[in-house]
Image: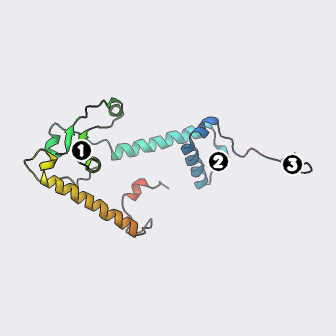
């Protein structure tokens, strides 16, 4: 600038200096800056210690939420009798995922496999609204009419709720606010 405007003096201050490692993690950088601005904090105080504190704070909150809502899925020997879409353990080796606490299973590949995963996920957090309680002699999903009807009812419910979310504007703190919003909103 001095070469372009030789008669003008310019002053500058370092307003924010981020260590090189922080710049490599754009998501953490955006999160921390947003957090500090939201809390009216002094983002100039961000240093290695403060950044590490926030990293561990985030991880601790995640672990608490994870342990509260997930990790209850326990597969039993007679799983096929309860879930006819259950095919067993996959032939691939997923030991890395299993060592991290994930349960990997094979389900019937009939185009509904994502919905089977969602149903198992709901059961994992204690929601059995779409668990088929009707007994039926069939052991394959293709022959199990009550489970087929349950999956279709689940898909219809997802469609209805999706259409409702698209049509209705829901404001936080109103009586029509879904209960699950509390699980994904900030704690402040």
Instruction: Verify whether residue 8 appears in magenta.
Output: yes
Residue at the left extreme, as displayed = 137
In this rendering, does residue 116 appear at all?
A: no
| Residue bearing the label numbered 2 | 43
Residue 109 horizontal/vertical position (percent)? 24, 44
| Residue bearing the label numbered 1 | 109
Residue at position x 69%, y 44% in the image: 16
**N-terminal label among 3 and 2:** 3
Left-right relation of 167 to 20 = left
| Mark toward the viewer: 3 or 2 | 3
Q: Which residues are magenta?
A: 5-15
**N-terminal label among 2 and 1:** 2
Mark 1, residues whose alpha carbon is within 10 Å: few (<14), some, or many (≥20)? few
Q: Are marks 3 and 1 in contact (CB under 8 Å)?
A: no
Residue at position x 29%, y 48% in the image: 114
Q: Is residue 78 above or below residue 167?
A: above
| Residue bearing the label numbered 3 | 4
Mark 3, residues whose alpha carbon is within 10 Å: few (<14), some, or many (≥20)? few
Marks 3 and 2 sit apart, C-alpha to C-alpha, by 32 Å
Left-right relation of 95 to 85 = right
Q: Are marks 3 and 2 in contact (CB under 8 Å)?
A: no
Residue at position x 46%, y 41% in the image: 59
73 or 2: nearer the eye?
A: 2
Marks 3 and 1 sit apart, C-alpha to C-alpha, by 67 Å
Residue 170 horizontal/vertical position (percent)? 42, 67
Mark 2, residues whose alpha carbon is within 10 Å: few (<14), some, or many (≥20)? some
């Amino acid at each position: 600038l001095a070469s372009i405007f030789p008669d003008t003096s310019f002053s500058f201050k370092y307003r924010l200096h981020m260590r090189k490692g922080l710049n490599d993690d754009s998501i953490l950088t955006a999160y921390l800056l947003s957090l500090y601005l939201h809390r009216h904090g002094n983002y100039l105080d961000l240093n290695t210690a403060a950044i590490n504190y926030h990293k561990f704070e985030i991880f601790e909150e995640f672990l608490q939420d994870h342990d509260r809502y997930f990790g209850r899925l326990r597969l039993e020997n007679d799983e096929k009798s309860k879930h006819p879409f259950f095919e067993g353990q996959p032939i691939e080796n997923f030991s890395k995922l299993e060592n991290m606490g994930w349960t990997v299973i094979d389900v019937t590949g009939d185009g509904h496999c994502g919905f089977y995963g969602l149903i198992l996920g709901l059961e994992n957090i204690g929601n059995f609204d779409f668990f088929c309680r009707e007994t039926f002699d069939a052991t394959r999903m293709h022959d199990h009419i009550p489970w087929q009807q349950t999956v279709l009812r689940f898909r219809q419910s997802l469609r209805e709720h999706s259409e409702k979310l698209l049509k209705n504007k829901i404001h936080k703190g109103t009586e029509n606010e879904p209960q699950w919003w509390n699980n994904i909103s900030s704690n402040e």
